[in-house]
Image (cartoon, rainbow, N blue to C red):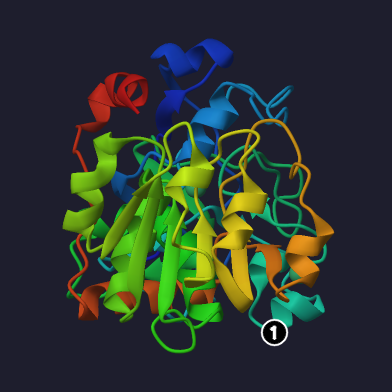
Amino acid sequence: MSSAPKQRKFEGWAAMDSNAIKGEMKWTEYRPKEFFDDDVELEIQYCGICGSDLHTMSDGWGSTKGMYPQVVGHEIVGKVVRVGKDVKHLKEGDIAGVGAQCDSCMECVNCKNGEENYCSKGQTGTYCGKFRRTAKGSKSYGGYANYWRGPAHFTIPIPDNLDPAEAAPMMCGGVTVYTPLKQYGAGTTAKSVGVVGLGGLGHFAVLFATAMGADVTAITHSHKKTEDAKKLGAKQVIVTGDDIKAAFKGYRRSLDLIIVSSNAPNMPFNAYLSLLRPHGHLVIVGAPEEGTIPNVSPFNLIGSNVHISGSAIGSVKGIAECLKFAGDHNIKAWVKRYTMKDANEAVEAA
Ligand SMILES: [Zn+2]
Ligand SMILES: [Zn+2]
């Protein structure tokens, strides 16, 4: 039988403590969760480096204490090499991916409505998490590794027309911006879209919003990213520099939707809100290591009926939709490739 149990040796780049972020991960054998009938195993081909990997290794969010050693990486793509007997949508040899979430309760109203990312009992992160549905208490391990094992429900086939290496960073970074762009009508009801920050998330936001037919305004702190923003498809670029008031002059009420992908502390939200047309949305997707939303004036909200919200990764269905959209629109992530053995070098450069 194709799914006969095989004893694979699971090894990955483990963060032993917060020094891992300085390029001190160690190649280590670890024990994955017990294999259940609804699980699969992937032989990992690609894994993106997400900002969350770095925040987790450094314990910047305060969630890693007691969870070392930790194998991070949640933009995983690989070949399906083992399939539990209850799995219907994948077979051995398929190319599939896993994003930032690898399990949820599968029973609550949100899970039943296909919004596993908002599971009422909380999601199991692909790393630095604990399984609660099967293999209760087992730690989850991510994709800077040779193999990945976990629930097939969260393992999504990669479309044939999408390069698996391009698909990897879309599993978290891509879908994190694709989801709110879709939700708030980029290219349809939201013709003018602003993107704050041009890192991993921001570059996807410009690519996807442009492909959805929106006019994109990139908002960046320095001139360094201006050319990149234009190459990605931005129609205009606002460089905020040290005088945001001056930079935003002439742009008041010019945007329908703003995706804030930066995770800098103390962002100038009042200034961003001034860019929104009435009924517009400002959606936060970047999570800073410290701080709250600073001093937003209620008048800026009341005066133009604008909304501030947040959005977390994407649902299983949302990831599949995002990958299909990327394949159909020939979206190319800007990726720099490293071999897995050079993971420490890649993390230091990130
Ligand atoms: Zn991520
Ligand atoms: Zn749930």
Residue at 60 percent across and 42 percent down: it is 140
Question: Given the image, on which type of amino acid does mark 1 rest?
Answer: Asn
- Residue 220 placement (x, y as % from top left): 39, 44
- Residue 341 placement (x, y as % from top left): 24, 25
- Outermost residue, bottom direction? 188
- Residue 203 placement (x, y as % from top left): 33, 53
Numbered disc total: 1
Quadrant in the picture for residue 331: bottom left
| Disc 1 C-beta below 8 A from ligand 2 | no
User: Which sits in the foreground, 250 or 222?
Assistant: 250
Query: Which quadrant of the figure contains the N terminus?
Result: bottom left
Q: Which residue is mark 1?
A: 113
Residue 253, placed above or below residue 55 = below
Query: What is the crowding at mark 1: few (fewer than 14 residues within 10 Å), some, or many (at least 20)?
Result: few
User: Which sits in the foreground, 344 or 332?
Assistant: 332
Residue 148, placed above or below residue 308 = above
Q: Is residue 80 left or right of residue 64?
A: left
Query: Which quadrant of the figure contains the C terminus?
Result: top left
Residue at 44 percent across and 79 percent down: it is 186
